[in-house]
Amino acid sequence: MNDFIKACICANEEISDSIKDGFDASWFDKTTVGAGGDISSKLDLFAEAIFVKHLGSFGEIQSEESGVIGSGDSQIIIDPIDGSSNALSLFPFYGTSVARINADGILDEAIVCNLANGDIFFTHIGSSVVQSRLWGESFHPPHTAPNAEVGLFEKAYGNPDLVALLDEESLKFRAPGAIALSLAYARSVNFVLFVGKFRIYDFAAGLALCEGLEVIVEEDYVIVSKDKTIADKIEELIKKVILN
């Protein structure tokens, strides 16, 4: 484990420790529109400040909240709180995502953490994806459910026609509302599907954790599955909706 990944884990542990007894009342306040286009909460900015403290020495940070922070040869893309609406609703599916891209434009590291339960996933270029726990000392390949019964469909609420087609094909899904986290769990579900506007903050780290899976990335949708047949079937349904 290199220094950058250690620093990311330390940042996540500090954030997790800060929220373990509940959210500060001020964190629910909304502030201004962030660089990613969403309105930032004080919780987002609180988490961002912790990441800047731990990662600022490694390169230029591009945050969904404040945009470009600092400078350096590496580009560090962070979503300080992935699933902000979940967090601010006290729905336990929210976390963080970090990806570092080197001076040659190659993604070196990716880290996604589920702050709600302490799961953390990371990978370094040329290495396998690893799963662990905050403050944990054991590291292992991501848990896999070979016969998963549900997929994860992010932005399902905006795609009712596709929802109907998935139902017709008995492709059950949940819509948890945190895309980087959903991608981190891709090995333990039937599929991960996103249909909508593609933002780098949402996908840089999450997709890097899907190495070895069937991954389809197009301008308006992303499909990930352990099973190529499932991925191809979902893409077929998407094209049917588009043609109609």
Image (cartoon, helix red, strand yellow):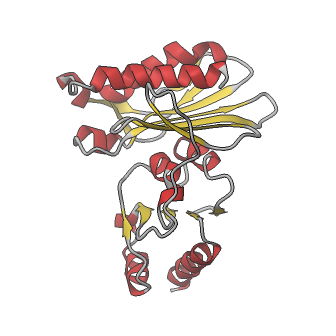
- Say if residue 56 shows up in the picture: yes
Task: Report the side of 184 relative to 127 (left or right).
Answer: left
> Residue at position x 49%, y 34% from top?
64
Quarter in which the N terminus is drawn: top right
Residue 66, x across and y down, in percent: 48, 26
Depicted 222 relative to depicted 6: above or below: below
The answer to which image quadrant residue 2 occupies is: top right
Q: Is residue 59 visible?
A: no
| Residue at the (25%, 38%) spot, across then down | 88
Residue found at the far right of this picture: 104
In the figure, is residue 177 to the left or right of 8? left
x then y, percent, for residue 93: 34, 46
Residue 26 x %, y %: 21, 23
Q: Nearer the viewer, residue 228 or 68?
A: 228
Residue 21, relative to residue 159: is it above or below?
above
Q: Is residue 242 above or below residue 38?
A: below
146 or 112, nearer to the observer: 146
Where does residue 220 sit, x and y in percent of width and height? 57, 63
Residue 6's quadrant in the figure? Answer: top right
- Foreground residue among 139 and 66: 139
Q: At x 38% / y 81%, what residue is drawn?
A: 167
Q: Is residue 92 left or right of residue 164?
A: left
- Counting every numbered tag in the picture gives 0
Residue farthest toward the left in the current orientation of the protein: 25
When asked about the image quadrant of residue 234, the answer is bottom right
Residue that sits furthest to the front in the current view: 138
Residue at (44, 24) in percent of width and height: 135
Relative to 64, residue 5 above or below: above
